[in-house]
Amino acid sequence: MRAYAAIFQLKDDVSQLENVSRRYAWLRRILRNYAESHAEVFPDAWRVAEHLSRRFAEATRDQLGELMATHDTVSAEDLTAALADTLAFEAQCNKKFGIVVAKEQSGGGTGPSHVYESSGEPAASFMGAVSCAFEPYMSIFIRGEQTKFETLVARFQAAPIAVDDDPSLSVLASSTDLLYQFRESLRQCASLSTGQAMLDLAHVFSYSMSSYARDVLVHKLPQSPGSSQQLEDLKHVCLIVNTADYCASVVAQLETKIVERIDEVYKSRVSFAACRDALLGAINKSIRVLVAGVEGLCEPAFAALSQVPWQTLQTVGDQSAYVSLVSSAVKTATE
């Protein structure tokens, strides 16, 4: 371990976060050397390789914690890559030393207990031994995800609505793109942390979807519905209604999935109520615009109705012209 400290000094390039895999490669070489040259000297019950790995984990945890605390420019990419390598290392240690979750747990412990698979004796899991150093800095990852979603929403806001002739496409493509990014972000976060970081990410999801409802869906509603409103505008509004309804449905599923995955202590704090309210608000505004649009299409018929000289009519015909106009306008708009 003295050699480890000498090789991986805080300010050297080899010690930086983007090179964390070199640390784990160093330990693998040490363990290989131990297995080939020294393992026969020590009794198996002493678990020398495991003790060495634990000492390594403690030293690495402290060094990485100090490294991140003293560097202001840790990137989200370097952080997540280093954490992924670290979690893989911890899982490999558990597998190498036969440490598994106990099948039956007594008492009301807050987390799973572990045992040696071969003997059933209690064991300490390697999970979290090094990765706990990253938890205070997961806000870097969260900020990176928030920036990504803000950029997406701004791009969607600037893009025109394209009404596809394919009737099976009943929602805006931007909504499926955004929700896909949500799922990918959740998948990545779940592989890194199911604690405070996942709760923070849930808040980012809710905020971003609220922004999408307000800055994209509501923003793209026709501003002045009335007699000049075109049928194409009604298609746009229908797309917006469907999109908001679709997003509200998927957000509910996403909320359930996060509650299932997140640590017990955070479950009650996961809420997407704010973005659901924003999406329902977008639906309500859209429906009002739809109704106003249909009224606008019917306006010529109402104008014709007001000009009928009722007092001079002498005979009853089959159907007045304004009735056909209203019927045609409503039928077209309804489709």
Image: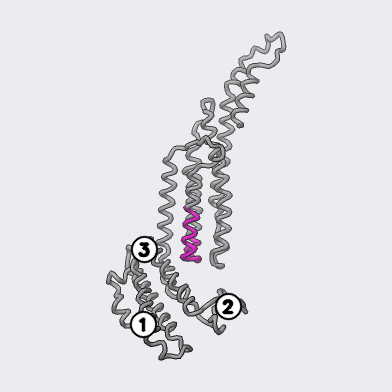
State the quadrant of the C terminus: top right
Say which residue label 1 marks: 33
Badge 1 density bin: few <14, some 14–19, many ≥20, Cα 10 Å: few
Three-letter amino acid code at disc 3?
Asp
Say which residue label 2 marks: 102
Q: Nearer the viewer, mark 1 or mark 3?
A: 1
Q: Nearer the viewer, mark 3 or mark 2?
A: 2
Say if 233 sits above or below 143 in the image: above
Badge 3 density bin: few <14, some 14–19, many ≥20, Cα 10 Å: some
Mark 3 or mark 1, which is nearer the start of the sequence? 1
Q: Main secondary structure of the magenta part?
A: helix
User: In front here: 116 or 216?
Assistant: 116
State the quadrant of the N terminus: bottom left
- Residue 322 position in % (x across, y down): 63, 19
| Magenta stretch contains residue 335 | no
- Tell me which residue sits at (57%, 41%) in the image: 242
Three-letter amino acid code at disc 1?
Asn
| Magenta stretch contains residue 191 | yes
Say which residue label 3 marks: 78
Span colored in magenta:
181-200
- Residue 17 position in % (x across, y down): 34, 68
Residue 82's disc is: none
Separation of marks 1 and 2 at Cα, in angstroms: 31 Å
Three-letter amino acid code at disc 2?
Ala
